[in-house]
Amino acid sequence: MKELFCGIDIGTTAVKAALFDRDGNCAGHGGCEYTLETPHPGVVELDPQIYLDSVRRACLEAFAAAGAGVKICSVAITGQVETFICVDASGRPLRKTIVWLDSRAVDEAKELEEHFTLERLCQISGQTAMLPCWTASKLLYLQKHEPEVLRRTAKILMVEDFVLHALTGKFITGRGLLPSSLYYDMNTGNYFQEMLDYLSLDRSSFPELHDSGEMVAVCHGKFLPEFAGAVASVAPLDHVCGSLGAGGGVDGIITETTGTTLALCCPLPEYMVDESRRIGVYHGFLPQSFTLLPWAPAAGMVLKYLRNLMLPGTGYDQVDTAAAAVPPGAEDLMILPHWAGAVSPDVCDHARGAILGVTQAHTAGHYFRAAMEAVAFLMRDNLEALSSFNVNCRELRALGGGAASDLWLQIKADVLNCPVTVPQQRECTACGSAMLGAVAAGLYPDALAIQQAWFRPGKTVEPGKNAALYQELFCRYREINQTILKWYSSKN
């Protein structure tokens, strides 16, 4: 029997599952997409059963690709954070999932900030602002508007916990998923009791806490027979797992994920809070480790929006071709990518995107290139903000859909003025999760050991002839961006 290790990545709109052999080779992968429900402004939900169905389909596709004669030794699950499900004692959902994108709890976020103060919440959680997307805000919303749901609730689970319960029958969670819940204390590694008291919730309403790579249960095989007897482990959030799979988490190597959102992962030697409240801190992939995680809610989202608006139905290869025909700087067309507000390195929830310098001579290709440059500029802004932590970026590892674009990789290398490497393994997030499951199964002693064995670098893009020009363009972007953000901040 071929021994395989499974990693599952539950994203905002899709699930991916991948199987890896003992040497880190991908033996099969699968995926399943779903559409979120947005019945009212600010409300984003999903039927919890869709997550289970999607995991099942993604895993079955991966099993089929791997072929017969395999044994699943372990499984670990990563994905989105803040998305939660209220269940009864048997694990049955009591209402629809409230997705992290949901922003209905604006008033509740303000109330929590006024009660605890932003300074204290930052020290406890490592987060830079009190936002309506944080889980605690939405739980307070349920206490006020749907109290009967919480009265019937036995456990409040992250979506990854919900799937783990289906696999094992256990209520378990990973510390790496919880910093932005705001009911978890990064200083103690335990639940933040004062927040639970304020939310009128008991400690028993939440699952057991475990470290990433720790064996937490054995799968019973009722959900998927192929998992029977497999060791189950918890994993941190998707960007941190992606960093593990991409060889990041070590000094000088920073990973970036350009998908719908933008996120960077940078290891932090010990827990420390950004006093300027520009960059959030999360748990790393090693027990009691930490990572800086500057992020932005819109990245690939901007390019997708422009593509659907200007060239609907076309593929991203055509987008690349159109953008490549335009010179650097997009002939003075500039985009500020704040389609869903600004988070890092500047917090401005009310900020919105801007397109500047428009003329009749600008084509779709100009807009596409300007969008790619905007994300690269935003990335540079965040990397420079990391300097307060004495972070040295000698190489960037690129993940996500944006890593498939040679043009975008070159723009990033030029703007950041450093090499950008794409790992051979394209499913880095699921791979990082599978690594942690393999550690839990005893294949390697820890995450760094298996990372060294499994990671394989791919192509590297060096800064090119346009690097000097992009340094000038970045200064122009920063000046305009700061002016626009100040204007949005002054409105509220």
Image (cartoon, grey):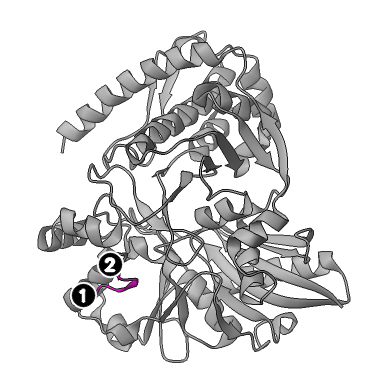
Q: Residue at 74%, 61% (x, y): give it.
A: 29
Seen in the picture, residue 438 relative to 356 is either above or below; the reply is below
Q: Is residue 168 a member of the stretch shown in magenta?
A: no
User: Residue at the spot x=47%, y=80% of the render?
Assistant: 172
- Circle 1 is placed at which residue position? 199
Region in magenta:
188-194
Q: Are marks 2 and 1 in contact (CB under 8 Å)?
A: yes
Classify residue 3 as left or right of residue 453. Answer: right
Q: Amino acid at mark 1?
A: Leu
- Under circle 2, the secondary element is helix
Q: Give the camera-side residue of 94 and 477.
A: 477
Q: Earlier in the sequence, mark 2 or mark 1?
A: 2
**Residue 254 position within the rendered picture, expressed as x and y whole percent measured from the top left:** 52, 42
Mark 2 is surrounded, within 10 Å at the Cα level, by few (under 14), some (14 to 19) or many (20 or more) other residues, namely many
What's the mark number on residue 85? none
Which residue in the protein does label 2 denote? 136
Near-viewer residue (334 or 471): 471
Q: What secondary structure is marked by label 1?
A: loop
The amino acid on which the numbered mark 2 sits, given as a three-letter code, is: Ala
Residue at point 56%, 51% (across, down): 243
